[in-house]
Image (cartoon, rainbow, N blue to C red):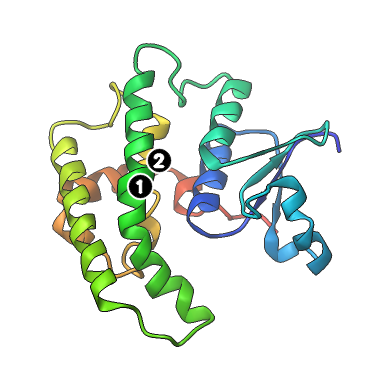
Amino acid sequence: MTRATLYYSKNLNPRLCVAVARYLGADLDYVGNHLLTPDQRGQIATLNPMGRYPILVQPDCTSLWETDAIICLLSAQVGSDLWRTGADQPEMIRWLSWTGHHLIPAGGVHYFENIVRPTFSDQPENPDVMASSMNDFRTYAGLLNDWLATRIWLVGDHLSYADFRVQTLMPFARAALLPVDDYPHILRHAAQLDTLPHWRDPFAGLA
């Protein structure tokens, strides 16, 4: 292995990781899980004890997992300030933490129930869980929408990793039946990211 390899699937966090890695221009090999043999898939747990993607394997065969950690490393390697390291870093970390603990868990229920589970089960969703998570999603989406009402970007005056992170769900939002049309500032923010080719289609040109 002469350069690092990013192993990915096309789910929420791996999609984000591939999109941002390609935006950064990181010098990586990309291997989708659809290209792995069953034995190779079984070996994923040796690279990530969670058994999930994405996983970055370095030339020395050490592995790094979790999307945010991978982007932190890649940003440093390419010399980008996408991952803020100065006075703006706490603000960026706040949005990463908030997204991971609040926005994605709420919207992720609908992502799973409306997109993922129908591929392997016909069991109906729990309506109480769906209603509760929708209420949570509306609360958090409303907060983000209000925050973006007076800002072009989340942190400072230009793009940061926080902007990508809070939009993790957006490429799947309509299929997940999330009511994103109710939040015009989130849609405007999403449209800004959609001007970036690797965000619109992270997997273009990959096997």
Q: Residue furthest top?
A: 87
Quadrant of image for the N terminus: top right
Residue occupying image coordinates x 36% and y 70%: 175
Q: Nearer the viewer, residue 179 or 107?
A: 107
How would you rate the neighbour count of disc 1 (Cα within 10 Å): few for under 14, some for 14-19, many for 20 or more?
A: many
In the image, 166: left or right of 142? right
In the image, 177: left or right of 197? left
Q: Residue furthest bottom?
A: 122
Above or below, 85 against 104 in this view is: above
Q: Which label number is shown at residue 167? A: 1
Above or below, 85 against 130 in this view is: above
How would you rate the neighbour count of disc 2 (Cα within 10 Å): few for under 14, some for 14-19, many for 20 or more?
A: many
Q: Position of residue 138 (x, y in %)?
A: 18, 56
Residue occupying image coordinates x 75% and y 63%: 35
The secondary element bearing badge 2 is classed as: helix
Residue at the spot of label 2:
164
Above or below, 91 against 105 in this view is: above
Quadrant for residue 166, please give it: top left
Quadrant for residue 105, please give it: bottom left
Q: Nearer the viewer, residue 195 or 80?
A: 80
Name the kind of residue labelled 1 in the image. Gln
Whole-Å distance between the Cαs marked 2 and 1?
A: 5 Å
